[in-house]
Image: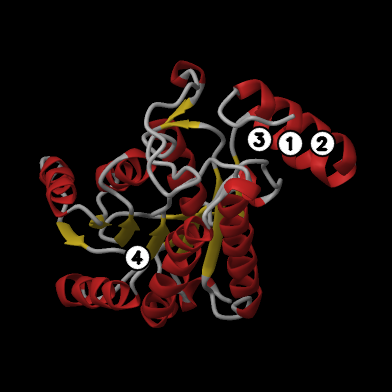
């Protein structure tokens, strides 16, 4: 692909690709808090048009009001990514407002904490519907517009998409599925100019763990983890925006996360034991 062929504004600096964000349209799901909200703020500061989506209408509008103070053009759309019709409407409203899409950030997600033997199967279905199918639905309806702009599809995954985590069978399954879907999509589009990024944060200070589902499908509530030792959502967003600008293939954040992925590749049996011991030490799930 020649540089002049791309609709996306791309500059070449020291043989590296760098995409300018000014006036690009960025759609972010799950953007009323946490990483999604932080990404919206980071892209807005770079001059992008921002579309944010979330299930709670009041929360997503509050986030939009804060973003408007940056001077960016903002559209907020309340919706549930587990519903195909809501995803279709989200894309339609984005096109109606901005005429196109340059970057889709599939961030909406939910976690779970329970041993599989104790788990209501509906919990796994709910996690898959949001984390996996939400990504599939939004990407499907956004893809024609992303192909026109030679834009970016981003999936916010997890180390759990590389290493199966005990007590998180549904969550790990959803992230493995997301990564497999996006990896296949990337290969399908090697010649079209579409950029596909899988971003894997480590433990991040956000409300994702508090909202995690337990065995009966209710929310976990307070998490015992020390958030002071985690990456902030703003730090994660900075890395994600940089990866989009540089059109990277994957990013794995935190030293612990990078080590876990590397260990799992070369020493899988040892990694299983280390992961078991680490999760057992957390005390959230009774592993023996």
In this rendering, the answer to whether 31 lies above or below 178 is above
Determine which residue is flagged by label 4. 81
* Mark count: 4
Q: Residue at x 62, y 41 (%)?
A: 167
- In the visual, does 84 lie left or right of 90? right
- In the visual, does 211 lie left or right of 16? left
Q: Looking at the image, do the residues carrying marks 1 and 2 touch, with CB atoms under 8 Å apart? A: yes
> Where is residue 177 shown, x and y percent of the image?
61, 64
Q: Residue at x 12, y 44 (%)?
A: 62
Q: Earlier in the sequence, mark 3 or mark 2?
A: 3
- In the visual, does 67 lie left or right of 147? left
**Within 10 angstroms of label 3, few (less than 14), some, or many (20 or more) residues?**
many
Q: Alpha carbon of mark 4 to alpha carbon of mark 2: how far?
A: 33 Å
Q: Earlier in the sequence, mark 3 or mark 4?
A: 4
Quadrant where the C terminus sits is top right
Q: Alpha carbon of mark 1 to alpha carbon of mark 2: how far?
A: 7 Å
Mark 1 element type = helix
Residue 245 seen in the current view: yes
Q: Alpha carbon of mark 1 to alpha carbon of mark 4: how far?
A: 30 Å
Residue 16 seen in the current view: no
Q: Looking at the image, do the residues carrying marks 1 and 3 touch, with CB atoms under 8 Å apart? A: yes
Determine which residue is flagged by label 1. 260
> Where is residue 162 shown, x and y percent of the image?
69, 49
Q: Nearer the viewer, mark 1 or mark 2?
A: 2
Mark 2 element type = helix
**Within 10 angstroms of label 2, few (less than 14), some, or many (20 or more) residues?**
some
Q: Looking at the image, do the residues carrying marks 4 and 2 touch, with CB atoms under 8 Å apart? A: no
Q: Looking at the image, do the residues carrying marks 1 and 4 touch, with CB atoms under 8 Å apart? A: no
- Res 78 label: none
> Where is residue 194 shown, x and y percent of the image?
52, 72
- Res 257 label: 3
Determine which residue is flagged by label 2. 271
């Amino acid at each position: 692909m020649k540089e002049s062929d791309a609709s996306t504004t791309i500059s070449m600096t020291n043989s590296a690709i760098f995409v300018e964000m000014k006036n690009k349209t960025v759609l972010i799901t799950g953007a009323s808090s946490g990483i999604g909200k932080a990404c919206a703020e980071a892209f807005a500061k770079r001059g992008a048009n921002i579309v944010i989506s979330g299930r709670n209408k009041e929360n997503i509008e509050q986030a939009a009001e804060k973003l408007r103070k940056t001077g960016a053009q903002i559209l907020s759309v309340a919706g549930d990514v587990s519903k195909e019709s809501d995803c279709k409407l989200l894309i339609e409203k984005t096109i109606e407002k901005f005429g196109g899409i340059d970057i889709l950030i599939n961030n909406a997600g939910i976690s779970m904490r329970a041993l599989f033997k104790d788990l209501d199967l509906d919990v796994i279905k709910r996690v898959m519907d949001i984390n996996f199918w939400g990504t599939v639905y939004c990407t499907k309806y956004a893809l024609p517009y992303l192909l026109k702009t030679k834009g970016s599809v981003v999936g916010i995954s997890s180390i759990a998409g590389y290493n199966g985590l005990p007590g998180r069978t549904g969550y790990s399954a959803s992230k493995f599925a997301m990564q497999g879907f996006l990896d296949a999509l990337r290969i399908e589009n090697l010649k079209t100019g579409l950029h596909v990024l899988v971003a894997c944060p480590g433990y991040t200070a956000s409300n994702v763990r508090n909202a995690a589902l337990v065995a009966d499908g209710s929310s976990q509530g307070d998490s015992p983890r020390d958030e002071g030792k985690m990456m902030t959502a703003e730090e994660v967003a900075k890395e994600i925006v940089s990866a989009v600008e540089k059109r990277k293939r994957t990013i794995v954040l935190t030293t612990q996360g990078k080590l876990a992925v590397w260990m799992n590749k070369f020493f899988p049996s040892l990694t299983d034991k280390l992961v078991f011991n680490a999760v057992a030490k957390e005390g959230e799930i009774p592993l023996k």
